Image (cartoon, helix red, strand yellow):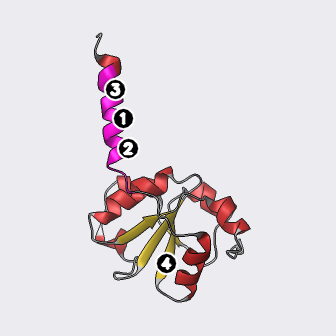
Amino acid sequence: MKYLPTFCLIVLFAAVSIAADHTKDSLATVKQNIENKKAVLVDVREKSEWDEGHVKGAIFLPLSGLRDGITPDKLKPLPKGKIIYLHCVVGQRAKVAGSLLEKYNYKVRPLKPGYDEIISAGFPKADK
């Protein structure tokens, strides 16, 4: 039992180290890449969060669905050969989703800025 805290820390650091890194792309670059059809924006938040508001044109692909198992149907909306920008609220779910999607050879770039920051940066909010 005396090694349990150390073991827990090792597991935590291992889990964090396998997550994809946040992109260095600015939100202006992200917006430009999306407008130029070089990239898409994927929202990995949960349905209730999506329903409260989301970016116009974003693809809805909640992290919980990816964790339940990745199937061809779930990946169908994601274009191959384009940059896949992933976002959530604070960037952690985006990193985990990025790690899962990297295994399928997607060019993922998880965003650290969350939904509110993306909207504040001028991305259009979808009508509910």
Q: Secondary structure at mark 1?
A: helix
Q: Position of residue 62 (x, y in %)?
A: 48, 59
| Disc number lying in front (4 or 1) | 1
Relative placement, left or right, of 118 versus 38 is right
Q: Dot 1 corresponds to which residue?
A: 12
- Which mark is on residue 40? 4
Q: Position of residue 112 (x, y in %)?
A: 54, 57
- Which mark is on residue 8? 3
Q: Are marks 3 and 2 in contact (CB under 8 Å)?
A: no
Q: Which residues make up the magenta segment?
A: 6-20
Q: CA distance from mark 4 to mark 2?
A: 25 Å
Of residues 126 and 83, the one drawn nearer to the viewer in this rendering: 83
Q: CA distance from mark 4 to mark 3?
A: 36 Å
Q: CA distance from mark 2 to mark 1?
A: 6 Å
Q: CA distance from mark 1 to mark 3?
A: 6 Å
Report the amino acid beneath label 2.
Val
When the figure is inspected, residue 11 is found, relative to residue 24, above or below; the finding is above
Q: Position of residue 75 (x, y in %)?
A: 35, 72
Q: Are marks 4 and 3 in contact (CB under 8 Å)?
A: no
- Residue pushed farthest bottom? 36
Q: CA distance from mark 3 to mark 2?
A: 12 Å
User: For the residue carrying disc 3, how many other residues have a C-alpha within 10 Å: few (<14), some (14-19), or many (20+)?
Assistant: few
Residue at (40, 81) in percent of width and height: 82
Q: CA distance from mark 4 to mark 1?
A: 31 Å
Is 12 inside the magenta-drawn segment? yes
